[in-house]
Amino acid sequence: MNSTHYLIAGASHAGLEAIHRIRLIDETATITVVTRDARLPYSPTILPYVVSGQSDPDRVVLRNADYFKNLNINLITGDELVAIDEANKQVTLQSGDQWHYEKLLLATGADPIIPPIPGLSEASFHVLRTMQDAINLRTHAGSAKTAIVLGAGLIGMHGAENLRHAGLDVTIVEMCDQVLPGYFDTRAASVIQTAFNSNGITMLMGSRVVKVEQQAQSCQVTLENGNSITADLLLVATGVKPKLDYLKGTSVQVEEGILVDRNMRTDAPAIWAAGDVAQAADFYQDKKVMMGILPDAVTQGAIAAMDMSEDYTLQPYTGGVPINTYTFFGQQAISVGQCMADDQSEELTQVDDDNHRYLKILLKDNQLQGISSINEEMDAGVMWQLILRKIDLTSVKDAFIARPLETGRALMSSTWR
Amino acid sequence: MTAYNTITFDPSRCKSCNDCDACMTACSQIKSGTDDLLYSRIKIIAGMNGSLPELALCRQCGDPECTKSCPSTALTKNEQTGVIDWDKSLCIDCLLCTVGCTYGGITYNMTLNHVAKCDMCDGDPACVKACPSGALSYVTSAGIFNDQHDREDLFVPGLSACQGCNSEMIMRHSLRKVGPDTVLATPPGCIPGMGSVGFNGTTGTKVPVFHPLLTNTASMLAGLKKQYNRMGRNVTAMALAGDGGAGDVGFQSLSGAAERNDQILFIVVDNEGYMNTGMQASGSTSYGSWTTTTPVGSEMKGKRTNQKNLAMIMMNHNCEYVATASTAFVEDYYEKLDKALAASERGFAYLHIYSPCPTGWRFPSSQTIEVCRKGVETNFAPLWEYERGGELRFTHSIDDPLPVEAYLNLSGKYRHVSEEQLQHIQEQVNERVKTLKRFAGLN
Ligand SMILES: Cc1cc2nc3c(=O)[nH]c(=O)nc-3n(C[C@H](O)[C@H](O)[C@H](O)COP(=O)(O)OP(=O)(O)OC[C@H]3O[C@@H](n4cnc5c(N)ncnc54)[C@H](O)[C@@H]3O)c2cc1C
Ligand code: SF4
Ligand code: SF4
């Protein structure tokens, strides 16, 4: 039986931040990282740019082999966690190897959801979560002329734009009436939609797919309204969901993801979870949510590691705040925190349609609840901290509303030194 | 650990300039060839509700969040320079780095269509050169720390100095630099008190160390040095003494050694009093200071007499080398230590280091260096050096000093100081500078 003090499953943003943090305070304990992917770590966020050819797969390695060697970390690639025996603190990998651990971090991310559309499972389609997915999609895009993208969430939108950059005619099919729901209100979403339309992407909003049929070289998609469209290539981007088969027989509690407390502990002893796989506290309400964004995976990975390594500087998780910095066709949509007002919040909007600019600030009790903008300069990190730290804006409110960027910078700068 | 050079910002100096924007213009010019401040990667922001200006600038973090949020590896910390480098060819303009950064250090530029951040101009920052008030400075002392890192710390770990003690820092830095071929004298005071001479038969110092009387430090060192010379061994005879041990009780032997120009490196760590025995006043204690022997009550308001200026007295011995130094200006100190060490081969070298004491002076232990810095910047503790036969030379500008309050306000020992006392202290500072200037051949 192999043995390791720390066992980290997953070598992406959450897992990598965790090993970094552990090594900061524990130079000697054994650390083993196991990842399903055969490649050195990379970010799923980069994949659309691999599809368009902008990013070279070999140049976006997050940590090279020397990094693991120098920190004396055992990296196992191309093997997968398949079972956990929590009583004996043991895991089994796909290869049959078994590992004994003292502390286990689950940072296995999420996998694409394949919706139960009749015919879809028999058709040949693409998803976008791994480098191999991206390379396959890029190869196919090289010979394809048309593409259909199911879903107008982050992955679908990034995927569609980059397929367009690769020269394809692209159609997006989305059930909701707006793109990127949850991050942007309808007004902001419509600016984004307009940009997609004017760049030659067809947007079929509020459309439900009822059937998919594979044809010789193409794929036919039938919509609820009876219309059908055909394309050489189909990309399914209808959301993600953690794959948790390895939890069978454990006491780890699960809803949509692995339920964790504010120190990223699961309900099972000596097991933590972080990143896209975890369902952790929300910032605004007393509930647990799936975040599915990169900065949060980093934060959660750090917290889990600090708890695991008994780092006394640990600050428990303050809760997830939605953040989206979205660049599309050279424009920027940025959203930090809530994007829709509720009855207690104060909403301030500035619209400049001619210049495609838009700014919306939501305040509650003179604290920032959320801010979203299109084509405005915005320091997302500064806004994030204003929300997380519940900074009282009473004395600077007018200035903040008039000049959120400068005022936010001044406030955060004053917390330094 | 490697230390790196860094840009520092003093908002109180910046404020006096009233939005000159010189740094931002310089940055826009050098990075984008325009005067449009939007292109500047350093942003001075007016303080909120009349408070001091603030700074949005990349802090070149030690554990940077921007790099962790970057999916493309476009951002990396350069191990050599400490700068967070940005590689345009890798960047996908996702702006996730701007989520990581709390300080507006990396921001999107709408005209350039990508993010931009401070790259410290390859070690020669244009903003610093443009700043007319000295609010921005480029601190390059990191090199010293990196060089010294490889040398052995010749004191044992775990000396029991107070938290934030400046003297411990001075001792460790100085002996590390002077090196192992040294015989060290530590007369009674904080320095032996914290354990450098040792306890129970074990020593706290990795070179021969002894504990002379307060009265005979310099004469014992003089004799030791002579004996080593006779044996043909080149050994540095070094003292680490407090201001009381040097300037009051030990003055007779100190003055004698300086007069004879004996080959000694005599370092005085001046914390303005007898701190280890319970904060009694010494001849170096400044006017108005609270100590346990110059208390504050209905009659007495701290020390009634002016401090004597031991460094100037030593200069008047016309010995080989005399200088003042401060730990807030380490580069300056290291240069002087080099000179003093060389001078001690020829004759008597004297270094006077201001050593604000968090415990005795009543300031938070995190503020030691700030108190040191303000001491120099108000001209309360000017930095100068003197070489035998030459003129006194200021090593930090004495022009445009801050008002002395900027220094006094930091320490509890001056808390009671009245308007008149303050005025007296300011006058004294001015006078002292005037005297020094005469020795420097100025005015
Ligand atoms: C196309 C795309 C675009 C995106 N764009 C953005 C964006 O603009 N902004 C943003 O904030 N976020 C974006 N995201 C989301 C972001 O990439 C994720 O939130 C982030 O990668 C989550 O990190 P993680 O470490 O939790 O999991 P993941 O990055 O999903 O990594 C999971 C790791 O676990 C490994 N693994 C999986 N199962 C197992 C197993 N059973 N055993 C061992 N190892 C396993 C995988 O190989 C991988 O190393 C995007 C995602 C995609 C796919
Ligand atoms: S950009 Fe921000 S997070 Fe990155 S090093 Fe600079 S200050 Fe730190
Ligand atoms: S904008 Fe560029 S540098 Fe910033 S996180 Fe994205 S890829 Fe990295």
Image: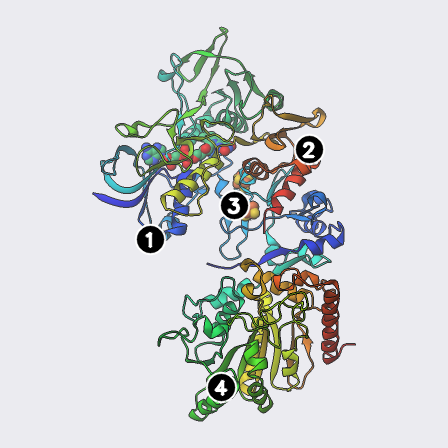
Check disc 2: other Cα within 10 Å, few if <14, some if 14-19, many if 20+.
Answer: some
| Badge 1 amino acid | Thr
Image label count: 4
Q: Nearer the viewer, residue B255 or A239?
A: B255
| Relative height, residue A234 to residue A392 (above, below) | above
Check disc 1: other Cα within 10 Å, few if <14, some if 14-19, many if 20+.
Answer: few
What's the distance in space between the residues labelled 2 and 4, CA to CA? 69 Å
Which label is found at residue B121? none
| Badge 2 amino acid | Ile
Please say if the residues under marks 2 and 4 sit with CB atoms less than 8 Å apart: no
Asked which secondary structure carries label 2, the reply is helix
Residue drawn at the location 51% of the way across and 53% of the way down? B78
Mark 3 Cβ inside 8 Å of ligand 3: yes
Q: Which residue is mark 2?
A: A401
Determine which quarter of the picture holds residue B194.
bottom left
Q: Which residue of the protein is positioned furthest toward the front in this rendering? A: B298
Callout 2: chain: A
Which label is found at residue B221? 4
Callout 1: chain: A
Q: Position of residue A165 (x, y in %)?
A: 54, 29
